[in-house]
Image (spheres, helix red, strand yellow):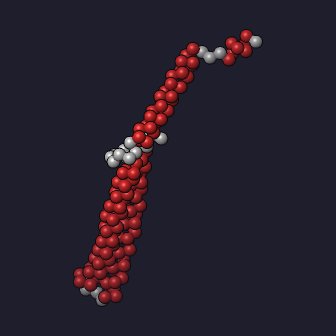
Amino acid sequence: MNAVNEANKESEIAKAERLAKNEKNLAEIRGRVERKKYNKMTGGIAGFTNESARRKREEMEDFRFMMAFGVGFISVMFMGFLTGFCIGKFVLETSEETALILALCTGIPTLILEAILMIIRLDKWEKRRAYERKKHSMD
């Protein structure tokens, strides 16, 4: 029986490491509990830590981002088609039908390029949002 107990005994170094790890985890859990209590206590106060105020700020930032992007997207798309038409009509002095075809040849690649840029911007935006949410949440 003593041989089994001796084999199962934990070394002093391993025990100290385990206790240190447990203490660190307990400190982290206590911090989370305190943070939740603090957030609950200050929930109705306007300010940076207020969850509803933070959500409103995020919604306004999202709205501004989408409006700025939408206006830019539409104007660049319009300019792409208009540039092609004007080059065909006034620079190359072709017929209107040919100028319209040239407008399509310049406008469609512009549209594709803008779509690719939109995907990249939205991906960066979402990564930034996720980082900010992670930074502000202590759950």
The foreground one among 99 and 134 is 134
Q: Is residue 96 above or below residue 66?
A: below
In which quarter of the view is residue 7 placed? top right
Q: Is residue 79 above or below residue 49?
A: below
Residue 83, how many percent across, how many down? Answer: 28, 76
Q: Say which residue appears at 31% left-offset and 84% top-offset.
A: 99
* Residue 51, visible in the rendered structure: yes
Q: Considering the image in quadrants, where does the N terminus appear? A: top right
In which quarter of the view is residue 91 placed? bottom left
The foreground one among 58 and 71 is 58
Residue 82, how many percent across, how many down? Answer: 29, 78
Is residue 30 found left or right of 125 in the rendered image? Answer: right
Q: Say which residue appears at 37% left-offset and 50% top-offset.
A: 54
Is residue 134 found left or right of 68 in the rendered image? Answer: right
Residue 135, how many percent across, how many down? Answer: 40, 43
Is residue 109 found left or right of 4 in the rendered image? Answer: left
* Residue 80, visible in the rendered structure: no
Q: Say which residue appears at 34% left-offset and 80% top-offset.
A: 102
Residue 68, how many percent across, how many down? Answer: 31, 64
Pick out the residue farthest to the top: 2
Q: Say which residue appears at 65% left-offset and 15% top-offset.
A: 9
Pick out the residue farthest to the left: 90
Pick out the residue farthest to the right: 1
In which quarter of the view is residue 106 placed? bottom left
The foreground one among 8 and 77 is 8
What is the count of numbered marks? Answer: 0
